[in-house]
Image (tube, helix red, strand yellow):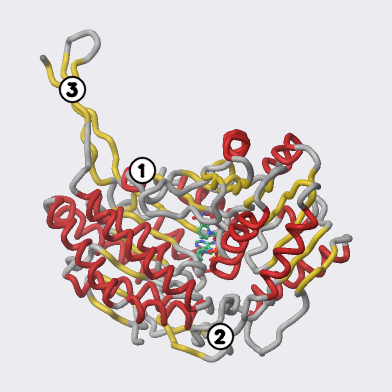
Amino acid sequence: MTSPHDLFIDGQWRPAADGRRFPVHDPADGSELAQFAAATEADCLAAVDAAADALASWSATPPRQRSELLRACFDLLTEEREQLAALIVAENGKAYADAIGEAAYATEFFRWFAEEAVRIGGDFRLSPSGDKTIVVRRDPIGVAVLVTPWNFPAAMATRKIAPALAAGCSVVLKPASQTPLTAAYVVDVLRRVGVPAGVVNLVTPVPAGPAVSAMLHHPAVRKLSFTGSTEVGRVLLHEAADQVVSSSMELGGNAPFVVLPGADVEAAVEGAMVAKMRNGGSACTAANRFYVHDSLVDEFSTRITTAMKAVTMGPGADHSNDLGALVSPEERDKVAGLVDRAVAEGANLTLGGGGQPSGGAFYPPTVLTDVKHGTEINQTEIFGPVAAIVAFSDVDEAVAMANDTIYGLIAYVYGDPAQALSVAQRIDAGMVAVNRGVLSDPAAPFGGTKQSGLGREGSSEGILEFLEEKYIGIEV
Ligand code: NAP
């Protein structure tokens, strides 16, 4: 399990210009895994320069060649997915099953976009007045800055790098400072398969703000693709405005999970466990608010408490554990604070809560019933293994509560398929899962409405974020 600990600029792994480094920790025990290079602002701008220099030849590289390089990444990462999963476990803390699942998901973006690289379309038609031929091309937008979070350190990087490269863009990746090792491994795979120097660069400035701002003010940068919190997304939209940099935003969520009257409770709990516990609850797609009809809420609460009790918690290095550590002690304390305040506000703790059994950043599976709509835990992205259950009596009320949030990333609905579909259509979210607990699929458009984001990743839409349309009018 080795991964570079340096910056990757213009095809070379190299230390920061001033030699500064920052520690990367294993959240399961707090031990130090590595000292990673802390990029200076000059390093970040050098990475943009390298990407700008590489752009013309990469965008002119035949789509088939770009496609084959991406396919080679898929093949190599498929062979090495155990190594990738081990790195994810080590620096992120998640359970092995989640890490190997992420490795497969992350790898799939290379295969999907290898296939999309050779299918970039355009348009060709006669104008309505018959005076000209309208030709619409789709060209690479230019140098892209990609900023990613710690919760899916491989998949959030590949979901951006693969479409960008497929489109013919060159990139500078800025991964989260808590999880740079996984990103460095992925970038090194791109190097190993022969992606030319400068096409992919990796920088890790600490703190991130000033250096990312400097990159967004570099005249060569034409694209920002960000995944992370809504709070930081807002800051970056302001930063991107100065040079009118096209921005795609995958931001926070507050997913409702609605169990309609007449739903199959056993199936709903099975789906709820996946929607809640995938990635230990540290997912933008995690079910955050359970709205369960009065007639089913007792049975649902009892069953989910039983299912949560059966979850085994411990270091992801022990592959038998279902639930790993949160990414840091600060993240664990944030979750603990939310639960404690929810109980103080009148919620009933039926399982879990409290502490830290083993010294790492662990937080146990937790169930809260009698949660009130509108309370802090109901309106905040929990990002941990906590199921907070609200009862409802009327379907219109459930839809209104589901929509009563600034977020609109994803929602889950369980019930009779016709009723569930009609409720799904009334929920304001970019994605709705009907009678299933997981939706993410490289072949489907991922993204949110409202303050959960702008644009889509994956699917055939994902590559459009890195392409710009050019209209050429030809005299008939
Ligand atoms: P975050 O704090 O917003 O950080 C995300 C990235 O932005 C990191 O690389 C971070 O760098 C960087 N960053 C922080 N402050 C910055 C600034 N002022 N300027 C430029 N870059 C800055 O988010 P996180 O805690 O890593 O991730 C959790 C959040 O991501 C949750 O809200 C989750 O819902 C969201 N998320 C959304 C999706 C989606 O697809 N919609 C997917 C996954 C996660 P440092 O690490 O160096 O601070």
Q: Amino acid at mark 2?
A: Pro
Position of residue 350 relative to residue 329, above or below, is: above
Q: Residue at x 28, y 71 (%)?
A: 78
Q: Residue at x 22, y 50 (%)?
A: 117
Q: Residues within 10 Å of mark 2 (few under 14, many from 20)?
A: many
**Cα–Cα span, label 3 and label 1:** 25 Å
Q: Which class describes the residues within 10 Å of circle 3: few (<14), some (14-19), or many (20+)?
A: some
The kind of secondary structure element at disc 1 is helix
Relative placement, left or right, of 202 versus 240 is left
**Side of 5 relative to 434 (left or right):** left
Q: Residues within 10 Å of mark 1 (few under 14, many from 20)?
A: some
Residue located beneath label 1 in the image: 461
Which SS class for mark 2?
A: loop
According to the picture, the residue beneath numbered tag 3 turns out to be: 473
- Per the model, the C-alpha gap separating discs 2 and 1 is 37 Å
Residue at point 34%, 86% (across, down):
2
Which kind of residue does numbered mark 1 sit on? Glu
